[in-house]
Image: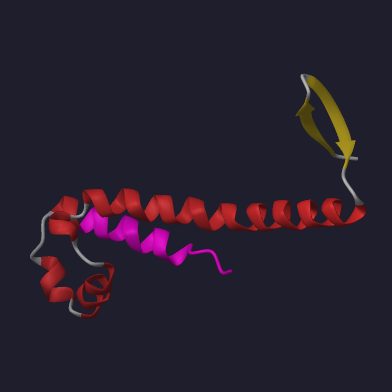
Amino acid sequence: MRKHTIFQNGKQEDIPFTPEEEAAEDLREAELLAKKPMEKWVLEMVATDAIMVAGLARTLEDLLDANPGVLAKKSRSFKENHSARKIIRARRVKI
């Protein structure tokens, strides 16, 4: 059982959670755990934002895919970065 630690009049006291507090804390922890995969995905996307040329908007990536002739004219590193982003985008976590 979890406990609150309080300090009062220079003394430390541990008070057990009530059943309601315990349930609320369980819910909060479950919500945090559920968000972790999405947070990881967002960090991966932000990292690829930094390497894309001229801050290419994610919506423009779809246009590049629809027009392969435009992508063919880009540098090899641009194409590799674009491919990496597509892979990461495909792994987006459903919440």
Quadrant in the picture for residue 28 = bottom right
Along the line of sight, the residue nearer the viewer: 10 or 24: 10
Q: Is residue 92 magenta?
A: yes
Residue in the picture at 33% in, 59% down: 85
Residue in the picture at 47% in, 55% down: 41
Residue in the picture at 30% in, 52% down: 48
Q: Is residue 36 left or right of residue 25?
A: left
Residue 42 percent across, percent down from the top left: 43, 56
Q: Is residue 8 left or right of residue 36?
A: right
What's the magenta region? 79-95
Q: Is residue 47 left or right of residue 68?
A: right
Seen as rendered, the residue at the extreme bottom is: 66
Number of numbered markers:
0
Along the line of sight, the residue nearer the viewer: 66 or 89: 89
Residue 6 percent across, percent down from the top left: 78, 31
Residue in the picture at 35% in, 63% down: 86
Along the line of sight, the residue nearer the viewer: 84 or 46: 46
Q: Is residue 16 magenta?
A: no
Seen as rendered, the residue at the extreme left is: 73
Residue 92 percent across, percent down from the top left: 48, 64
Q: Is residue 16 above or below residue 91?
A: above
Residue 8 percent across, percent down from the top left: 78, 27
